[in-house]
Image (cartoon, grey):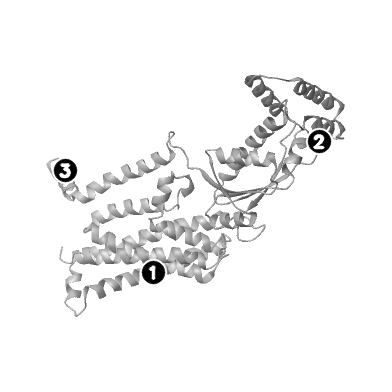
Amino acid sequence: MNALIALVRKDLVLHFSNRRAVILSIAAPILIAVFFGGVFGGDTKPSAVPIAMADLDHSAVSAGLVAALRADPALKIVDATPAQGMAQVRDGSLRAAITLPAGFGAQAGPALFGAGPRPQVTVVYDPSQSTVLPLVRGVLAQHVMEGLGQSLFSPASPVVSELRQQAMASPRLTPEQRAALTGVFDNVERLDAATPAASASSAAAPARAGLRVPFDTREVQASAHAGQHYNSYAHAFAGMGVQFILLMGVDMGIGLLLMRRLGLWQRLRAAPLSRSVLLGSRVLSCALIALLVFGVIYAVAMAFFQVRIDGSVPGFVAVLLAFALLTASFGLLIAALGRTPEATRGLAILATLLMVMLGGAWVPSFIFPPWLQTVSMAVPTRWAVDGLDAMTWRGLPPSAAVLPVLAMLGFSAVFAALALARFDWDD
């Protein structure tokens, strides 16, 4: 029993003697819990969804609908032509684009009662963010019904009599439906000098009694080619590849610390080699390994999961090269900051998970609060995932890879400089 107690005491003393590792093992779950609790908390309001709006009708009804959509806190409306909206959704700067067709205002009123064809509203959406389309459909239907109720079913409406004539002449209505609509129109026309409360109730009633939604939607995925469906594996392989390649870079950094602990660095330093050459060789070898591993990952994705490089092949290769250098410099920096293998593992888990989460590999960045979306732009993994998405399923040109590549190279240079300055050769 004394031997057992002594061994347990020895393990406890060894574990808690490395204060940095202990602190990191406690800080990691706390910070990750704070992140998910803040993002998915019940009191957290989601950020407004940026959507392009093109009004090709320019009628009073369409103008009222656009004004209502602008006032909706769930949306952030940006004026754009249909072509501009498609391009901005495709490159990921907007989530969806709505186009109201010409004749929308004239057709929507009769279509509410089945007395005419329904106008077709085009909704272009980002297929990688599946929650956006139901939101846009719901908000659009809500404001269309409310707008028609206010504009068409009020005592002062100039189109009530015209709607009566169109509805009564429509061959789509049965005699029972015509009789019911006649009563509705008679009640509307008898209203005069109504109170605000009465007007509100009379406006709401037709919306509840409407025979159908007065428009159709044509939903278009903003993918690389028309009619091509979104392949979710493209984003999944990008996100998970980024995560596990980063962890591989950390393992290379820990290998440096083990070599130092075994005294191998002292032997290498006896040779006429500078610190920059020794560490630079480690960075280069780690980058080559990361590039080869990521290449194999994407080869499997292409062979078995139909992932395609629909954008620029040189741009795709450039993104992989930049991320490979980022991985190597990140692993070196983690090793320089951790100082010991035990502390480095804890620091690596914390840093990698936070970078992957903030980079949008796990949780889509559009559901982040606005301030967190801004912060995520300062995270290198955000640029890696966005660059890989741009060159694969988004099908963007080589210019879309320039900014992600430059950002990752900049982070790599900063990480390498800090690692060279902080790496302790003698500890």
Q: Residue 111: percent from the left, percent from the top?
A: 76, 37
Task: Judge from the rendering whether residue 139 lies leftward or rightward of residue 336; answer left or right.
Answer: right
Label 3 – label 2 distance at C-alpha: 87 Å
- Quadrant in the picture for residue 321: bottom left
Q: What residue did someone put label 2 on?
A: 115
For numbered disc 1, what is the local secondary structure?
A: helix
Tag shown at residue 4: 3
- Amino acid carrying label 3: it is Leu
Task: Judge from the rendering whether residue 287 lies leftward or rightward of residue 207; answer left or right.
Answer: left
Q: Earlier in the sequence, mark 1 or mark 2?
A: 2
> Which residue occupies 37% across, 60% down?
246
- Amino acid carrying label 2: it is Ala
Q: What residue did someone put label 1 on?
A: 289
Res 357 seen here: no
Q: Callout 2: few (<14), some (14-19), or many (20+) C-alpha neighbours within 10 Å?
A: many
| CB under 8 Å between discs 3 and 2 | no
